[in-house]
Structure formats: structure tokens, C-alpha cells
Amino acid sequence: MKTKFSISWKKSKQPRKQRKYRYNAPLHIRQKFVRAHLSKDLRKKYKKRSIAVRKGDTVKIMRGQFKNKTGKVELVSLKKTFVFVSGINLTKKDGTKVKCQLHPSNLMITEIITDDKMRAAILERK
């Protein structure tokens, strides 16, 4: 199987091809993989269900051991498709604390940073 990303790839039911698509996707397509649901009041306000997570947004964790905790997004890793939230740390056996990687599908955006003109335009689009 080729390892290069294919623009002409449409769809496949085969999990190996879906994994290959996600693994080899360029960054502009990976941006779509880091989308999270909006809270009910934001959904009503912007008439959108989900939006890309950005640094500075406030999110609520919906799944996992940190469920129902909120925090600001510190870092969004497009390469690994993970989000790091402030205050969410794991303690290793030797006692050191490490930032916990969270998948965007397990998050809900509660506050949006709209100081960027481009992002404000995306939100106002119907």
C-alpha cells in the first residue's frame, strides 16, 4: 500500500484504509479532526454543532477519569490529534506530573475566544 496521502480518496469501509487516511493526512485536513461539540447556549447562539478547538478556549471534559472538569486549552497537537487542558495532569509512579492528552471528541466547548477576525467570520457564517 502506498504511504502517500491521496487527494482522490473518497471513502472506504475498510478500517485499515480509514486509519491510513487519518495517519497520512496533511495538517490542513487534520485541522478538521480537532473539532469539538459546542455547549447548548453556544449552539443556539451560533447555530453550529461543532467547531475547531483552539488555544485559549474553555472546554468541559465529557468522558474519562477527568469527566465534568473544565479548563482552558493550553495546546492543540494536530500531529497527534490531541488537546492539552490546563489543570488536567496525570501523576506518574515516581511522583512527577504530566499533562494529560485528551481527544477532542471527548470535549465540549463552553467559551470561545473570538479575538481572531477569521474565527469570528467562521462563527458568523450560516
Image (tube, rainbow, N blue to C red):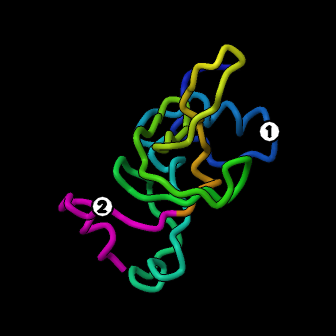
Which circle marks residue 28 in the picture? none
Residue at 47 percent of width and 36 percent of height:
78
The number of numbered discs placed on residues in the rendered structure image is: 2
For residue 61, what is the image quadrant? Answer: bottom right
Q: Is residue 91 left or right of residue 42?
A: right
Expressed as whole percent of the image width and height from the top left, the position of residue 33 reads 54, 47
The local secondary structure at tag 2 comes to loop
The kind of residue tagged 2 is Ile
Q: Quadrant of the N terminus?
A: top right
Which circle marks residue 15 in the picture? 1
Which of the two residues, 44 or 33, is positioned nearer the viewer here?
A: 44
Expressed as whole percent of the image width and height from the top left, the position of residue 38 reads 51, 69
The local secondary structure at tag 1 comes to helix
Residue at 73 percent of width and 35 percent of height:
17
**Circle 2 crowding by C-alpha within 10 Å: few under 14, some 14–19, many from 20:** few
Q: Residue furthest right?
A: 14
Q: Residue furthest bottom?
A: 44
The residue under label 2 is 113
Expressed as whole percent of the image width and height from the top left, the position of residue 34 reads 51, 48
